[in-house]
Amino acid sequence: MLHDLTQRMRIDEWMDDPTLDCNRHRQALRGLARLNWVSGSVGRVWKVIRQYMSEQGQNELSLLDVATGSGDIPIGLYRRARRAGLHLKIVAVDISETALEVARHRAALAGVEIDFRRCDILGDNLAEQFDVVLCSLFLHHLEDGPSVELLRILKQRARHLVVVNDLLRSRVSMALVWLGSRLLSRSKVVHFDAMASVRAAFTLSEMQGLVRSAGLESASVWSYWPCRLLSVWCDP
């Protein structure tokens, strides 16, 4: 917690290791889903999507969720849309088969229809376009150059809306994430990766610079409690 956070420092997270034991991976995914729930990520993202649908007079959209992990974000969005009488046709991708296995199981238990696919968004050729492209808590895993490339890919895949939800790097974030990761999970993987994620996260000004470099000049970027950044680019 005493590390200097004035400069971004990215280190490999344990969950990015393909040799990580599957049981430890599943436990970590459950812990991260709890952290997402506490942070209100689903509600923040849904508010953006719901506002766009209302403004455009649409009751159905296609959505791509990149690096979906345990699928808690798209599952939550699907359920909120259903309660509102709206429909999201969701494709969710991840590079990890373990994560996709967990996500499919969670979606089945929730009675949610999502097309989960294995995909390396930076390496595979995903030709489809979607009304909305979402990426949550993945950008900070990348160096600056690949982060810009990812944002460009998200824009290419989106017909109308790009939503990026990620961590904010600050001392307050470090303290909250340290406490939250230990209160909400017993996973040592979560404990390590949570702290590594804050050190690798972006500040508000750094995120604004990334979206400009990626050609999303009109994107809005703001922070929200607790310790999150949200970037929204819209092309009606």
Image (cartoon, helix red, strand yellow):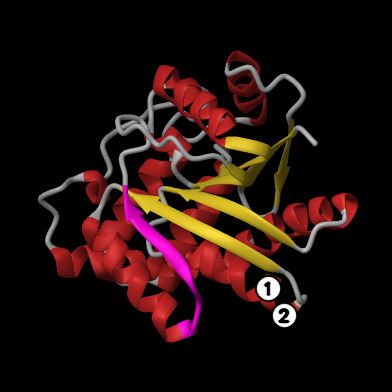
| Residue occupied by mark 1 | 80
Can the viewer see residue 188 in this picture? no
- Check residue 176 for magenta coloring: no
Residue at 57% x, 61% y is 89
Quarter of the C terminus within the rendering: top right
| Residue occupied by mark 2 | 83
- Pointer 2 local density, CA inside 10 Å: few below 14, some 14–19, many at least 20: few
Q: Is residue 224 above or below residue 60?
A: above
Number of marks in the image?
2
Residue 82, quarter of the rendered image: bottom right
Q: Residue furthest front?
A: 128
Give the magenta range: 110-118
1 and 2 marks in contact (CB < 8 Å): yes
Q: Position of residue 24 (x, y in %)?
A: 19, 66
Q: Amino acid at mark 2?
A: Arg
Q: Position of residue 215 (x, y in %)?
A: 63, 17
Q: Amino acid at mark 1?
A: Arg
Q: Is residue 137 above or below residue 182?
A: above
Where disc 2 sits, the SS reads helix
